[in-house]
Amino acid sequence: QNYIMRFFVLLLLSVASLCAAMRVAVTGTTGLLGRQVVERLSNKNIKVNALLRHPIDNSVTPSIDKDAKSTQVALYLSQLPGVTMVAGDATDLASCKQLVDNCDAIIAAHGPVKPPPIQSLFRLLPESDPVHSRSVNYVAVQNMIDVVKESKSCKRIVRVTGKGEEPTAFFTVLINMLGNMAKAWNYEGEQLLRTSGVDYTIIRPGVMGRNDIPTNKVRALADNGQDLKVTAVTHSQIAELCCDCLDYSNAAKTTLTAMNVDAGLGEDSYAPLLENVKADSRDFPSTLLEEHKRGARNGAVILASFLAVFVSVSVAVLKSISGFVLGIFH
């Protein structure tokens, strides 16, 4: 019994030592997902290099609440143990080089800012603009691949994306139309990772945002980019998955779909699910960019036709009302 106890004590000490020595780079630091990733890593005694686009503002009240401003979140995270803020932008190669310095992995939790609908519908923002979805979901991923290939320590990229293999699906078309082709460039960014030769874990979560979901054995994963029924998931769950997958070498070169299932049909944690995931083995489409763009164009035509009919009917109704009112007074 004493030998068994000593073995487990040594094992725990070894794990704690590895965690203490580990350093992870994080992008999307102040986002609803990124902030939870940073906090979770810090709680696990893992050092963090957190990318931040704006200077720290010490005059605000630090907070990590859902409704907190990015400046408040940044100050809160900067005060956590083991967290180092790195100034820069993921779309800038030099920033990425500085970010991954002495890191073992990257968790890329960043995403594009929601643009004004008119700007996206009429493609008023150039694809080369740093806030365009191409820059955020594609160029930034290429930057990370480049710096990982040069790095002597950084060996894994964990990238959070979303379902994007169905260019004509309603929500895919809608997001592409109103989000500067965000779904399209997310998929192209995934393909950069799959063909890069570096170790990656691509995570395709369900709909993040709601917290009123069951918690008893609901977690589910599908590897090889396989489909699961789309459900709500919490930012906390996906942050947990991002961090936990780093502990599993078999989770390298995998595309994981993360959803929830009915209570009791899944798992309480991702550990037993991650133990069984396998590397991608199917042939993913090499590119879906043109299909995505075609779907968005067709969607825009349908939307424009609907608006034209709506305006026409509205004008006709207004004319009828005005004619009726004028008739009363005459």
Image: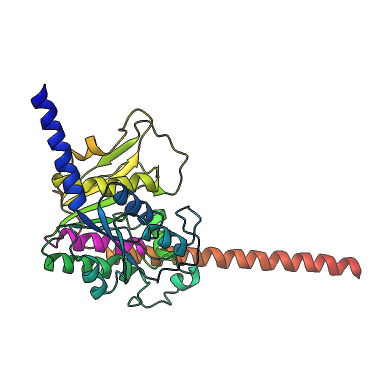
Q: Is residue 186 magenta?
A: yes
Residue 26 x/y as whole percent: 29, 59
Q: Is residue 119 magenta?
A: no
Horizontal side of residue 312 vs 71, given as left or right: right
Residue 91 x/y as whole percent: 29, 72
Q: Where 274 falls versus 119 (above or below)?
A: above
Residue 42 x/y as whole percent: 31, 51
Camera-nearest residue between 86 and 215: 86
What residue range appears in magenta?
182-197
User: Quick one: which residue is furthest to the right in this view?
Assistant: 330
Camera-nearest residue between 163 and 293: 163
Residue 41 x/y as whole percent: 29, 50
Horizontal side of residue 124 vs 287, given as left or right: right
Q: Name which residue lies at 17% across and 42% down.
A: 15
Q: Where 280 falls versus 180 (above or below)?
A: above
Horizontal side of residue 203 vs 8, given as left or right: right
User: Quick one: which residue is furthest to the left in this view?
Assistant: 3
Quadrant occupied by the N terminus: top left
Quadrant occupied by the C terminus: bottom right
Image coloring type: rainbow
Q: Name which residue lies at 35% across and 44% down.
A: 237
Is residue 286 visible in the rendered image? The answer is no
Camera-nearest residue between 311 and 10: 10
Q: Name which residue lies at 32% across and 29% down.
A: 265
- Overall secondary structure of the magenta stretch? helix
Q: In terms of image quadrants, where is residue 321? A: bottom right
